Structures are given as structure tokens and as C-alpha cells.
Image: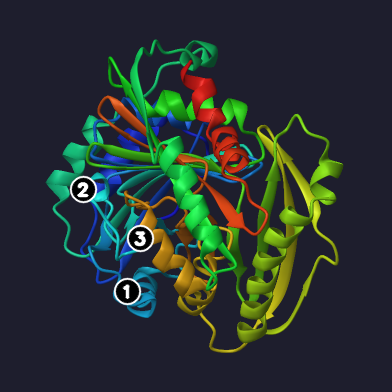
Amino acid sequence: MLPKNNLSSLQEAKDQMALLIAAYKPSKSVERIEIKVEPVDMLSWLSLQIDDVKIYGANQSDTVSIAGIGQAACLTDIRLGNFRNIFKQMRHLLTEKYPYLQWYGGFCFDEKHQDDDWKDFGAYRFVIPRFELAAQSGKMIFCCNLVGNENIKSILRQLNKIVIPAKVTYGSQLKEKRTILRRTDEPDQKLWQKDVEQILSEKSVKKVVLARKTSLHFQQAPDPWVMLRQLKAVTPNSYHFAFQFKKTVFLGASPERLYRRYQRAIESEALAGTISASSDPKVLENSEKNKYEHGLVVDAINDSFKEFCIKFSKDKQPGILTLANGHHLITKFQGQLKDGIKDEDILQFLHPTPALGGTPKEQAMAMIRKLEGFSRGWYGAPLGYVGLDWAEFVVGIRSGLVYGKRLSVFAGAGIVKGSEAASEWEEVENKISNFIKIIQ
């Protein structure tokens, strides 16, 4: 089903979509209706919809973005199983006929440590949205995805419920009255000190990334889509994302790509070593502690690329990535994959990198399970999309979970030789500052 040649308003596209859905003939594969539309604001559109499943993603330059509601197909489980089976099922529905068709979703950080906060996300969850808006370089399409023997009447009812946003003044959507009743930190600063000391005394690990969960309780439930718009305003040059399953929304602004694959080409990056934005970047370049922490991540990615690449290259020296709330050391990798290496193999090697777990991996993960009194869920885990012959995953950092009147913000710090509990606490405080900034 091909797009119309002329641009339609979203209302016109909705009317045209109804006719095309009504004419749908059951198929063993996926059918996709695409209609070119005049661009609309995706976050306004998402905030108006009443569906239990909503998805948003935008690249670092905000030139490519997607907003989806509902699900034409879904893969999820409370246990991870193996990556190979998950990707095999995703590939089964991807087709050259529809190059823009993609799965969107993510994995949990550690399937051995889950809790009720994340029950609707599972160990993994990937969906093909029922309806979506997809934009690239200012051009937009409105899409409907159909799989197998669909209930056409149900889909038409869902289409009919889609609300079309009126023209909006975006500045007005950057404000929302939020009264914070209380804040809790898990662990609190006293326990954090104890945990850091325990990690530093453990001889079997070189680095452990210790995370903190800061929960803010509001008088009224915040609108996560307004919150995401505000977050975008203060975090340029980041991957912005939101996943809503039922009443829980996980959203964030990640600066870190885990990997991007296009056919046999792959890119990744080591991002570790942080100082506040108010500091001189040269302090970071000359910090032995930060260079050591960064080097552990570089070495781990380097070892992985040796395993799955025919050839690869990396930056000779770390660069400086400057974002709104800090300076970071960054080393970029590019490579050519060996024959037979697939996304499931890449994830098996790369996740979690020492930037989010630690090194050695197994010993670091054991300490995280022992010390952290909460589930990270999708925080620090791979989030992204999978297409026919490409995939991209970012690391779910600089992120928070919205449920009812509560926002839980997650952030971590790499504990290595030379770390001090007080300064690492401040580093985490700095990392959550973007969320604090937008709600005050």
C-alpha cells in the first residue's frame, strides 16, 4: 500500500486511512499503510492519545523521530531467554517491501533483579506500533501496521479514537505546575558512603558502577509528555526516548550510543569519565582517575570488536563530549562485521559495558545485585529499534520512570581506585540535575 503523492493534513490522512484499512485483505506477513502528511508536533499528538502503549524516539540531531501508539505485534517475556530467539522472531516480520517498518523496544539491565515498578516492561519488550508518525528531515508519514488475520472493526475503532492536535504554542507546553511533597534517595548518602567503601575494599573488581534511585512524589500526577518536551529543551545533542506500557512511562535523554549497525558496518563508543559543566574540560583530560575509568570501557569495547569484526578502528585519544550538565571522555569505534555476526551476538558482547556494569563483568554484576536495593529495570539497558538490515541501540541513562504521582530518576557513578564517596554522590546529583531543573 503506497503513500499518496500529495501531502495530506492529519485529519485527511485519517479519513483516507479508514478506507484503506477497510479494504485490507488478511496476509501471512505485515502490510503497512503509509500516507504522506503535513508535519505535526509528535509530543502534542502523543499526549492527546488514550492508548495504553505509546512510544517516542528521536536521534541526537532531532532530524529523525517516531511516535507510535498501540501495537500491531509485540514480543515480551519476564525472562530473557536468549537474544537469538528474540531477534529471529523480529526478523520474521521485517520485509524489503516496507523499508520504514521497524520494531521499537528494549531489554532490562539484569533479568535476575526485577521488581513491580517494571512489571509492564518485562525482561524485554519490542513492539511494532499499530499507528505511527515517522519523520525525517522535516518530512512526515502517518502509518498503520497490519499483521495477519486482523480484527478490522477493532482497528477502525482505534483509528476513530485518534485525536488530532490543534495548532499549539509550544512555549505554553513547557510549563506545568508541580508541587513536590517529598524526595527519597535509595541509597541515602550514609549508605552510599558504606557501599562505596565496600566496593573499594573488594580486590576482585577494578570498577563497579553504583546506581542511585531518587524518587520525587508530587501532589498531582505529572504529564510525562510535557516532561519529555521540557527535558528536550535542556538536553540538546541527546537521544530522546519514551516508552509507555499501561500507566508507566520510562523516558530520558541519553548521550550514549551502545551501537549502530547498518548492513555489515558498525559504530560504537566508550563514554565514561565525567566532570561538571562548570569545570574546565582540561581537568578531565588530566584526571588519572577519569582516564583510568574511561580506559576500562575502551578496553572492553576493543576486546568485543576483536571478536566480531574483520577490521575496526578507534580514536587514538579520547575526545571531550560536552553536554548541558557535564563534560565526558568519549572514544569512538568503527568496524566491519564478520560474516554471520548478528545483532544478538553484538549485544551479547557489548552489554553491559564497564560504563554501566563494571569490570570484570560477572564480579561487578554480583556486587551490584548485592548492594543495590532496587531494580534498575530498563535503566542502563539497551533501548532502540530493529529494521530489516539495520539496528541501533542506545544506553538508557539520564532517565526516569513516571508512575502516577511519582517520578523515579536513575543515575550512577563508576567506582574505581581513587574514587571518593562524596564526590561520586555529587556526580550522580549532577547527572539527575536535568530532571530536577525541569520540575522546579
Q: Is residue 347 visible?
A: no
Q: Is residue 267 left or right of residue 176?
A: right
Question: Residue at 40% of width from left, 68% of height from top?
Answer: 366
From the image, state whether disc 2 or disc 3 is nearer to you: 3
Q: Which mark is residue 370?
A: 3
Q: Position of residue 241 (x, y in %)?
A: 47, 43
Mark 2 or mark 3: whose residue is earlier in sequence: 2
* Label 3 packing within 10 angstroms: few (<14), some (14-19), many (20+): few
Q: Position of residue 397 (x, y in %)?
A: 51, 47
Based on the displayed image, in which of its 4 quarters is residue 18 positioned? top left
Q: Which mark is residue 116?
A: 2
**Label of residue 348 in the image:** none
Mark 2 to mark 3 CA distance (whole Å): 19 Å
Q: Residue at x 48, y 15 (%)?
A: 440
Q: Is residue 205 above or below residue 244?
A: below
Q: Position of residue 112 (x, y in %)?
A: 29, 66
Q: Does 313 sit left or right of 276 as displayed?
A: right
**Mark carried by residue 89:** 1
- Pointer 2 and pointer 3: residues touching (CB < 8 Å)? no
Q: In the rendered structure, are the residues bearing label 2 and label 1 in contact, judged by CB atoms less than 8 Å apart? A: no
